[in-house]
């Protein structure tokens, strides 16, 4: 039974702030921001080639609970649908995540710890923080955690689209979290 370890993980990350981890629901949350809240500027990208990337490129901690019992691996995708003037920007493609994991600590996504890295829109295999242009409004960074029945053997370097092709018919459930950021 994973209820007790998930409760302990939630308490450790969120402290005693009430019923943050919903009983029985597959959820993903962050102690760094509430769902649909603004992300701190430290999570923005840091890229000398892009004047809009003025953050520290820190990645937020995440915690999840109540994955389906048949889960053999998890995948996490972070996508900005407003990025690239509406064509979207993928900031993270991570998969082969162990079903025993209950989250990622601060900067684990940036440092590529605990997952196989796919290829995000900028071409990296780890977290690439938000870099929206000034005046484009607050973009929505959708963190989607997918439970799958696939063993953790997918090859490195899959794009978001290629990962989704591999997951078709193998996805068990998904949980989401949205962080917003704008300049």
Image (cartoon, rainbow, N blue to C red):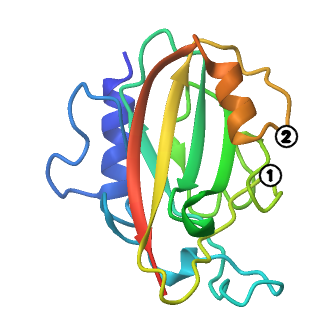
Q: Residue at x 41, y 75 (%)?
A: 138
Q: Residue at x 21, y 37 (%)?
A: 22
Can you say whether 140 is above or below 149 in the image? Answer: below
Residue 158 percent coordinates (x, y): 80, 36
Residue 46 percent coordinates (x, y): 71, 81
Can you say whether 155 is above or below 126 in the image? Answer: above
Residue 1 percent coordinates (x, y): 36, 15
Residue 95 percent coordinates (x, y): 68, 34
In this picture, residue 116 sits left or right of residue 41 = right
- Tag 1 or tag 2, which sits nearer the N-term? 1
Can you say whether 59 is above or below 133 in the image? Answer: above
Q: Residue at x 51, y 83 (%)?
A: 41
Q: Provide the residue designation for mark 1.
A: 125
Q: Residue at x 79, y 20 (%)?
A: 153
Residue 149 placement: quadrant: top right
Q: CA distance from mark 2 to mark 1?
A: 7 Å
Secondary structure at numbered mark 2: loop
Q: Residue furthest left?
A: 18
Q: Are marks 2 and 1 in contact (CB under 8 Å)?
A: yes
Q: Nearer the viewer, residue 78 or 66?
A: 78
Q: Provide the residue designation for mark 2.
A: 157
């Amino acid at each position: 039974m994973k209820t007790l370890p998930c409760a302990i993980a939630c308490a450790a990350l969120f402290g005693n702030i009430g019923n943050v981890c919903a009983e029985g629901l597959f959820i993903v949350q962050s102690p760094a921001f509430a769902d649909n809240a603004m992300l701190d500027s430290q999570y923005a990208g840091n890229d000398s080639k892009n004047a809009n990337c003025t953050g520290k490129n820190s990645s937020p901690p995440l915690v999840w609970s109540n994955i389906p019992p048949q889960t053999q691996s998890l995948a996490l995708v972070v996508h900005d649908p407003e990025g690239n003037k509406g064509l979207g920007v993928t900031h993270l493609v991570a998969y082969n995540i162990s079903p025993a994991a209950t989250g990622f600590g601060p900067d684990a996504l940036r440092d590529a710890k605990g997952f196989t890295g796919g290829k995000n829109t900028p071409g990296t295999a780890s977290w690439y923080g938000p870099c929206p242009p000034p005046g484009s409004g607050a973009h929505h960074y959708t963190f989607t955690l997918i439970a799958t029945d696939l063993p953790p053997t997918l090859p490195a370097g899959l794009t978001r689209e290629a990962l989704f092709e591999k997951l078709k018919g193998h996805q068990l459930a998904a949980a989401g979290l949205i962080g917003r950021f704008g300049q």
